């Protein structure tokens, strides 16, 4: 099966796998908390949460099913907000199959990591998968600015790589020393392992793309980067041409060969290495794609 060029790739308005995760997780939360009595809720938690003794009893589905249970509305909202923010862009780059592998794989690894490193009581929530999305995003777009609302009030802007590093270091410290000092029931080890799993998968895909083994990823990155550059620049500048017609300033030709050269440069040195002419080529390619 041949790779499609950047001009042939069309992205859905809202990626299907991301939408499915959001809907399924929210629906299961509603059923669990509002349609089951206390006894049934306890039974669901026993069989489908992540528990070390559950694995010993061969409840082998638990590393997957625990991701779809949550301990409260805020727990659900936080995880699904991360999926919403990072999932849409990542799925457009990876495609639905590899995106699900990223999300579910990071969640499964996070659950197993929790069972190995912590393992007390039970673990629920999609935090491992959500942190895997952050890890992948930081690998693909390390210098992309991300704005957070600290305490839901104060805006703080960090680079994706810096944000992922803060979560990784914080989760590491809290995994091994936090419970002794502060206690609490947050599965920091699942956050840590899920984040590392997502970042590791991201670096593996980048390595394959740099070696020419993943043309789809390279072209998808070009589409996303070009669209972001075009949105950042806004409408093209206009000037008066001879004959009295208003026309846009001349743009460099976005040939497939030129696009591939620019995408190779992005993979090797990052988006920040592009000069003004190369940025305009990607903007032009993205505009042609979405016309």
Image (tube, grey):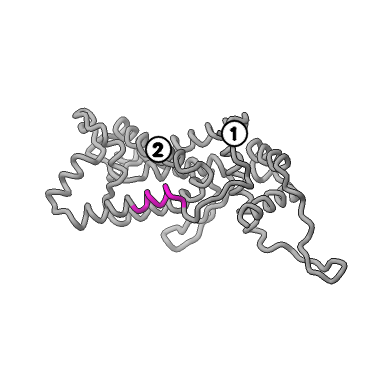
Q: Which residue is mark 1?
A: 209
Q: Which residue is mark 2?
A: 106
Relative to 10, is 243 above or below?
below
Relative to 62, is 69 above or below?
below
Magenta span: 15-23
Q: Position of residue 226 (x, y in %)?
A: 64, 50
Disc marking residue 261: none
Sequence-earlier tag: 2 or 1: 2
Magenta stretch: dominant SS?
helix
Residue lying at the far right of the rendered structure: 242
Q: Position of residue 69 (x, y in %)?
A: 27, 47
The reply to whether discs 2 and 1 touch (Cβ–Cβ < 8 Å) is no
| Residue drawn at x 21%, y 55% as measured from the top left | 33
| Residue drawn at x 20%, y 58% as measured from the top left | 34
| Quadrant containing the C terminus in the rendered view | bottom right
| Quadrant containing the N terminus in the rendered view | top right
Q: Secondary structure at mark 2?
A: helix
Q: Give neighbour class at mark 2: few <14, some 14-19, many 20+ (Cα, 10 Å).
A: many
């Amino acid at each position: 099966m041949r790779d499609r060029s950047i001009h042939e790739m069309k992205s859905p308005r809202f990626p299907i796998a991301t939408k499915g995760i959001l809907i399924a997780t929210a629906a299961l939360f509603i059923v669990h908390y509002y349609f089951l009595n206390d006894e049934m809720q306890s039974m669901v938690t026993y069989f489908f949460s992540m528990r070390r003794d559950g694995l010993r009893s061969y409840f082998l589905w638990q590393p997957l099913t625990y991701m779809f249970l949550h301990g409260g509305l805020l727990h659900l909202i936080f995880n699904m907000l991360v999926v919403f923010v990072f999932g849409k862009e990542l799925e457009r780059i990876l495609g639905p199959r590899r995106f699900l592998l990223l999300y579910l794989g990071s969640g499964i690894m996070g659950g197993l990591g929790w069972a190995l490193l912590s393992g007390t009581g039970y673990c629920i929530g999609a935090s491992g998968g959500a942190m895997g999305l952050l890890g992948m995003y930081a690998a693909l777009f390390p210098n992309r600015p991300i704005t957070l609302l600290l305490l839901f009030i104060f805006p703080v802007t960090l680079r994706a790589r810096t944000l992922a590093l803060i979560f990784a270091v914080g989760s590491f410290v809290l995994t091994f020393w936090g419970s002794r000092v502060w206690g609490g029931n947050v599965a920091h080890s699942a956050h840590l392992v899920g984040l590392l799993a997502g970042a590791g998968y991201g670096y593996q895909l980048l390595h394959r793309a740099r070696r020419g083994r993943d043309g789809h990823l390279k072209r998808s990155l070009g589409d996303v980067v070009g669209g972001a550059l075009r949105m950042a620049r806004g409408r093209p500048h206009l000037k008066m041409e001879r004959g009295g017609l208003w026309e846009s300033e001349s743009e460099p030709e976005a040939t497939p060969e030129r696009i591939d050269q620019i995408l190779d440069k992005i993979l090797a040195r990052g988006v920040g290495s592009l000069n003004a002419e190369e940025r305009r080529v990607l903007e032009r390619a993205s505009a042609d794609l979405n016309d």
